[in-house]
Image: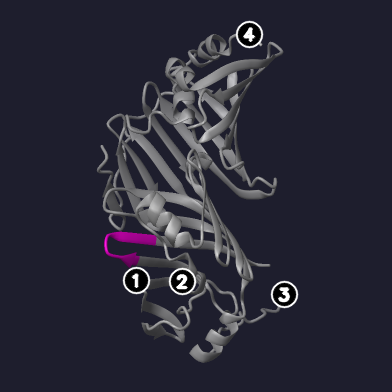
Amino acid sequence: ASDGAEKLKEMLNGYQSFSTNFVQVTLAENGREAQKTEGSLKLAKPNLFRWETQQPFPQEIVSDGQYIWIHDPDLEQVTRRSADSSQGSAPALILNGQIDTLRQTYNIRLVDDSGSEQLFDLQPVSDQHNFSRIRLAFANQIISEIMLEDALGQRTSVVFNDQELNPDFDKTAFLFRVPADADLIIDTEE
Amino acid sequence: CSLTPTQIPEPVDTLSWQERQDQLARFTEWEISGKIGIITEQDSQSASLKWFQEEQEYQIDIRGPWGHGGASIFGKPGDVTIDIAGEGKFHGASPEFIMQERLGWQLPISDIYWWIRGLPAPEKAYQHSLNNNRLKQLNQSGWDIQYLSYNNHLPALPKKMRMSRDGLKVTLVLSSWIPR
């Protein structure tokens, strides 16, 4: 398999903004479906995104460029972290196309390329990472699935649908307003 | 004539507090899925929660967004393993001991085994208040527990509860209870 990092960078450079719906399924290590939820993602490089999932596990993760807000409506809890503190999470790096940073922590291999479809396999350089394996699938040059396996053997698959490249968002797309009834926690490790 | 579906009346939970305690004490096998919010003085986390209980054995899975990070607790009386993502496996006699050592704070899993059903832990002093024969508020082992809502099982089981002690506040949302 050729050097995957350059190919992945090339595939993720084709857009400045991105939007999609997704279905997220988490499988416990015995393969049983532990959790299924649907959601949507809006993203504008380099570091703006809004990741929302619906019932039964509603959650909103918004990066407004300065802070990352994690809002759990049913817990009535909002956590604010500095934007750079969790930029290092692999899914954020992948979707933002920050492959030069990603390749410092994951070996990126292109394991399948049929022209219209590509499959990348990422394995952590050291075992101190939460994800023991990540696979990325592309169809017609657009990312179609992210598969994440964590060090505890749990697999999460995020399948994208209705992807749109370079949509234009209105300026409130990445703003976060703290709901009145939520506990706002400022992450002091900023 | 219109065929109105016969409405089966929703079974109303009219158990007394004593009857409820007896029934819930015998309910020792379940699979819970939901969410847990943990607020400490320095940080706050929110994660998905899975709790498999079979008599005295349990497995509790806590996972962050995208399955990121988290931990699994495997417990049998006197023999507990906590597997923390990216850190490894830790063994001990009780989950509280391991958590205090690894995380600097602890959840009284052995008591939560009772509280999560809406029961005080046995053989320990407690104060409580009821609301239509169900726990509304409980003080035990230094924790203050608020029962914010119940589901419509028979007997009713907690759906949202908040446990706090000193600088630690834990919110549990128990979206589904599957009796095993």
Q: Which residues are magenta?
A: B164-170
Look at the image and name its color scheme.
one colour
Which label sits on residue B143? Answer: 1
Residue under circle 2? B111
Q: In the image, what residue type sits under mark 1? A: Trp
Nearest-to-viewer mark from 1 and 3: 1
Q: In the image, what residue type sits under mark 4? A: Ser
Q: Position of residue A171 (x, y in %)?
A: 32, 30
Give neighbour class at mark 3: few <14, some 14-19, many 20+ (Cα, 10 Å). few
Is residue A62 inside the magenta stretch?
Answer: no
Asked if the residue at tag 1 contacts the one at tag 2, i.e. Cβ–Cβ closer than 8 Å, the answer is yes
Marks 2 and 4, Cα distance to the nearest angstrom? 54 Å
Q: Mark 2 vs mark 3: which is more N-terminal? A: 3
Marks 4 and 3, Cα distance to the nearest angstrom? 69 Å
Q: Residue at x 42, y 55 (%)?
A: B99
Residue under circle 4? A2
Q: Quadrant of the C terminus of chain A?
A: top left
Which label sits on residue B2? Answer: 3
Q: Residue at x 55, y 19 (%)?
A: A107
Q: In the image, what residue type sits under mark 2? A: Asp
Give neighbour class at mark 1: few <14, some 14-19, many 20+ (Cα, 10 Å). some
